[in-house]
Image (cartoon, grey):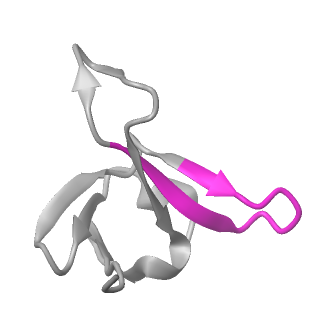
């Protein structure tokens, strides 16, 4: 799958049935050596459209359970 195909998909927490954001408004953490995506960095708050630093959710790529036509389902382990 290409990165352009992921853009615009909603990121949804499966357990809480909560929308976390949209891919394209998030950052990707990429391993420089392998080129693989390691995590999604999702901003949690915005102020007049600008991201506030330090308020973000880091979602390891292993938590991505399903990539569908319109959304990406995330399953956080119970802690």
Which of the two residues, 4 or 29, is positioned nearer the viewer here? 29
Q: Residue furthest front?
A: 79
Does residue 70 appear anywhere in the picture?
no
Quadrant hosting residue 70: bottom left
| Residue positioned 32% across, 81% down in the render | 75
Of the 4 image quadrants, the one containing the N terminus is bottom right
Does residue 50 appear anywhere in the picture?
yes
Q: Residue furthest left?
A: 17
Asked if 23 appears above or below 16 in the picture, the reply is above
| Residue positioned 43% across, 60% down in the render | 6
| Residue positioned 30% across, 77% down in the render | 68
| Residue positioned 52% across, 81% down in the render | 62
Q: Check residue 66 for magenta coloring.
A: no
Asked if 23 appears above or below 12 in the picture, the reply is above
- The percent coordinates of residue 22 (x first, y second) are 30, 50
Chief secondary structure of the magenta span?
A: strand
Of the 4 image quadrants, the one containing the C terminus is bottom left
**What are the residue bounds of the magenta stretch?**
28-43
Q: Residue furthest top?
A: 48
- The percent coordinates of residue 3 (x first, y second) are 55, 58
- The percent coordinates of residue 41 (x first, y second) are 48, 50
């Amino acid at each position: 799958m290409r990165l352009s195909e992921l853009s615009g998909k909603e990121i949804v927490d499966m357990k809480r049935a909560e929308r976390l954001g949209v891919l394209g408004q998030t950052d990707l953490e990429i391993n420089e050596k392998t080129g693989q995506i390691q995590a999604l960095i999702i901003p949690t708050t915005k102020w007049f459209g600008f991201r506030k630093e330090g308020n973000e959710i880091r979602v390891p790529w292993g938590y991505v359970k399903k990539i569908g036509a319109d959304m990406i389902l995330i399953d956080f382990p119970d802690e």
